[in-house]
Each structure stands twice: as C-alpha cells, then as structure tokens.
Image: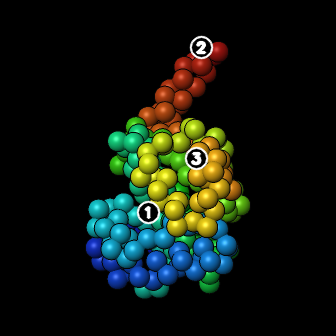
Amino acid sequence: MEFSVEVANESHQRYAVEICELIKESAKARGTGIAERKPEYIEEKMRSGKAVIALQGDTLAGFCYIETWSNAEYVANSGLIVAPQFRRFGLAKAIKKRSIELSRTKYPKAKLFGITTSLAVMKINSELGYEPVTFSELTQDDAFWNGCKSCPNYDILERNQRRMCLCTAMLAPSQEELEQMEYDLSNLILSVA
C-alpha cells in the first residue's frame, strides 16, 4: 500500500472530527489513555504546521501532532494514531519518523519525549532513538500532566506524585544534541586514526 505522509495544513482540517474519533476509539479498545482532543484543537495543530497526517488517496490513514512544553525545552509527539485497516504496514513508524523530523526542524534545542502504554509505540520509539527514562527526566510543566486527566489511569499518576504510572516515559536527544554527538564521534575517530 502507498501512503502520503506529510505535514498537515489547513486543507486537512476536514479530517479533524475523524481523527478525534479514531483517538477515542483506540483508547477505548486498549482500555488505556490517549488524551482526548477536540476537533478545534486538531485543526489548530494543522493550521500551525504542528501535525503530520497520513493519507491513502483521500482516505485518512493516520495522524500525529507535536506539542511544546517548558518554554520549548521539550517536544512531545502526541496522538499517534493509525486507522485499523491500515495497521501492520509500517505506517505508524513512518508517521512518527516524520513527526520527529518536524519537531527537530521547528525546535532544534528541544528534547523529544513521550509517554505510552503501547508496546508497538515503545518499539517504534526505540528504533527511532528514544530511550526509556524516569518521569523526573520529562517536562514538569503542569499543562502537560493535566493532559493525562482524561486517561482512566490518572489516579495512579496522581497517587504517585507524577513519578510513575502505567505509561513508559521515553526521551530522545534534541537536534543540537545529535549534532554534538556526531561532532564528538568524528573527533574521536580522527584522534584514533
């Protein structure tokens, strides 16, 4: 199957309600939390160039958006969703990869992070350079954690003073950190040679 995976814009706003329904249905099927969003919120992400959409022709296949936290020190790729009929084609990884590229382009100094209960998302994140971390390494921005309130496991998070939950926290380096690592590696190779 062929998909178009691109940065969303105003022309994609017509998919906002369908995206919200996909997110809601996925959360219900898994019995875990994906923060519910309103169509207006999704539309704003599209208008501001902070979302990635996957289409097969004119059919919605998947979606993800980016959020900044702690004065853009952190970026989260959130709401990753693939329509059931398009799962198992590697589309989630393609969407996530494009979301990471978008995040690093827009916010080169920001660390990328996410929390998830999905084993598939954890695997994709690992393949794309994320590593599991403790919740203390993530943004402490209250607005981020308030997004967890629609999750059925929110009481666990609160009971543990936001130190742990059923989600796994994952963190990836910023674009600047990646460039520094490449620079350091190049210098190490040159000094060994």
How many residues crowd mark 3 within 10 Å: few (<14), some (14–19), many (20+)?
some
Rendering coords of residue 135 (x, y %): 60, 43
Number of numbered markers: 3
Reading the image, the residue beneath label 2 is 191
Left-right relation of 28 to 138:
right
Q: Residue at x 40, y 47 (%)?
A: 69
Say which amino acid is labelled 3: Arg
Say which amino acid is labelled 2: Ser
| Picture quadrant of residue 7 | bottom left
Cα–Cα span, label 1 and label 2: 42 Å
The disc, 1 or 2, on the residue closer to the chain's N-terminal end is: 1
- Tag 3 secondary structure: loop
- Tag 1 secondary structure: strand
Mark number displayed over residue 162: 3
Residue 146, compared with residue 131, is above or below; it is below
Query: Looking at the image, which is closer to me, 99 or 151?
Result: 151
- Tag 2 secondary structure: helix
Cα–Cα span, label 2 and label 3: 44 Å
Residue 142, compared with residue 149, is above or below; it is above
> Can residue 121 be seen in the rendering of this structure?
no
Say which amino acid is labelled 1: Tyr
Query: Looking at the image, which is closer to me, 181 or 117?
Result: 117
Q: Residue at x 61, y 21 (%)?
A: 189
Rendering coords of residue 112 (x, y %): 50, 46
Q: How is the image coloured?
A: rainbow
